[in-house]
Image (spheres, rainbow, N blue to C red):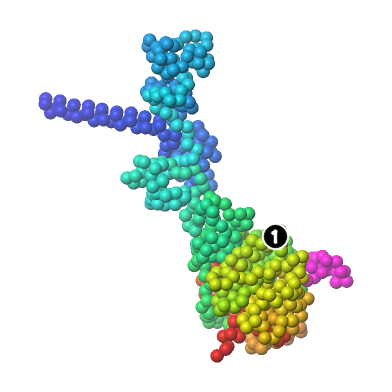
Amino acid sequence: MGRTLNFYKMNKLRLTVLLFLLVAFSVFSQEKPYVTYQVKKGETVFSVSKQFQTTTQNLLKLNPDIKDNAISKGQILIVPNKKYSKEPNIDEGDYEKGGFLYHKVLVRENYFRLKKEYGVSKRTLRKYNLALKTGGLVVGQVIKIPVKKGREVETKTVTVDDKNTKPYLVKMKDTKYMIARRYGIKVNELDELNPEIKQGLKENTIIKVPNRREIPDLTEEGIIMYQIEKKETLFSLSQKFSISQGQLLEHNPELSDGVKEGMIIKIPKVEMSTNNKVFTPSVLAGKQIKVAILLPFMGGKRIDFNEETTTTKKLTRTLNIVTDFYLGAEIALDSLKKQGLSISAKVFDTKNSMTTTATILKTNQFNDVDVVIGPMFLQNVKYVSQSLSSENIAIVSPVSTKNHTIFASKNTVQDTPSNEALSEKVLTYITEKYAKQNLIVITDDLKDNKLKYDKIIASLNRLDSTQKIRVLTPVKGYIKPELFKRNLLNGKENWIVLLTGDHSITNDVVQNLGVLPEKMKATLFALHYKGNFDKVQNQHLAGVNFHFPTTSFIDYEDVKVKQFIKKYNTKNHIDPSEYAFKGFDVTYDALIRLASDNMVNRAFSSGVSKRTSCKFQYINNSGKGFKNKGVFLVKYDGLNLVNVEEKSADKP
């Protein structure tokens, strides 16, 4: 009997505890605006949102991990709490909200007692309570009482929904540090938002995080995400992460509109350094490779060689470039075949049309192709890169210098170095060779260029803390000769860095330097060799020891160059143009790399190669394919161009 009674008491106790926990959980749940929900079989985003009386957009906002509107059985979601009420239960006591006390009229309460307790008159109460204008106080009635400053009342305050926070579902392997980093706060700040997590996180519980865009974890190979802090600039970011400002802009085009606090940007990791080892090909005999060449031969377009219109001239020039490139590529294919490589090649005319390019891809099998050479025009390169992104096919963009990062796939190969790479070549050379030379920078007075110039000047100023860079800016497009004389130093080497591409200023600089006394040493550097040098004679450039970067350099005394010219002339009865050299180099280099290793990532990471006119020095562009940084620094030696780096290497 005693044992039965004890068993009964124990069960009663368990039931009491269980009921207490259920009630406590129910009350606790009502205080939370969001709860977790486990998805059942067959449920969809739409059906769950309907069940919890919300919109699909709001459900997706609460659960950013949902991809393509698809949810699966067992998945944990954040959903609105249907039991949650912004208004507390008045039966649990008075509460304060929005400057008013919400009070439940008690037995024997009247206007006199209310005035004595809360300091408000009958007239004031009627003003804020419509029901009191037509009737008297009723026991159990809820009335609004304006709260007077300095008067203390025992209530609980109802906080308005916090718009500065949002719910976050704690996931497996989450840590407080990881969550805090994603939302740009410190761990102790996360603890302050969520006192219940001070002892640790629990999977599938909901916590509060700042209501801002999440800073993603590492999303691409070689990329980290960073949230810009107060007062940070493009320059300070480049210094902080040891990358160029150009790289920052390339990965974050929005920075060109200004650096703003709170922006989330991509930072390419410094491991994007260039691979400087020399590429060594494997034996080609017995290997096979399939190549598709996509070029805009402009088939079907009529060219009137007697017309002098701009359109015809442009079309004719394009056709000449494409034809020369293809004829050079043919020599490359023949050369590799003679070395034992089995090549299956197909040539397609894109007509510089995206529609034609799309048709080519749809009506031909590309899944067994190893490499696509082309297209030439950027919009078609973009289409091909995105269309073939899932395949292990190298897509070689042969001539465009523009930014490919926005659209490139992991297999896109940009073969022509960008303008940024050209500038970097010169500035790196100056940095490495600087030995207290007198540095002079020539700019123009265009406002659009000022920010760019200021950044370069700042980087050069860091070379020597004992002397500042001398900056010469034209007045009304002209630099006075006296200004040159005052800034050039006798008995010291003068390095003049030309930043502007203005024709008049360029001519001014070359002429002023050309009349210097022989004892005064001067070297002129340009970050780009463009049309501003077209009217400057080579002997004048030689006289100022002119250095500039270029993506192609042909040494006509080189054995490989002589062999290529001979083969090309024998086959086509004409000497090769610059684009014929390029067609040979691009095709030869891509095919011999892929024949040595058929995986695109390894093939273009296997070292530096130099062909007849081009250097191929690839860097992995953070999961966006490869960029060639193979740039030559050349100068005039008499009337001949020489490779500065090779010439200095030849010195004993």
Judging depth in this view, the residue of 273 and 79 nearest the camera is 273
x 47%, y 41%: residue: 165
Q: Point out the stretch of residues depicted in magenta.
A: 298-317
Q: Is residue 340 visible?
A: yes
Mark 1 = which residue?
447
Rendering coords of residue 133 (x, y %): 52, 11
- Where residue 650 sits, quadrant-wise, is bottom right
On screen, residue 309 above or below 231:
below
- Where residue 335 sits, quadrant-wise, is bottom right
Residue situated furthest right in the rendering = 306
Q: Is residue 333 visible?
A: no
x 60%, y 64%: residue: 455
Residue situated furthest left in the rendering = 2
512 left or right of 36 in image: right
Judging depth in this view, the residue of 33 and 452 nearest the camera is 452
Q: Secondary structure at mark 1?
A: helix
**Image quarter hosting the N terminus:** top left
Q: How dense is the environment of label 1, judged by Cα within 10 Å: few (below 14), some, or many (20 and up)?
A: few
498 left or right of 16 in image: right
x 56%, y 74%: residue: 431
Q: Can residue 305 be found in the magenta stretch?
A: yes
Give the residue type at disc 1. Lys
Rendering coords of residue 146 (x, y %): 48, 21
x 50%, y 62%: residue: 240
Rendering coords of residue 134 (x, y %): 52, 9
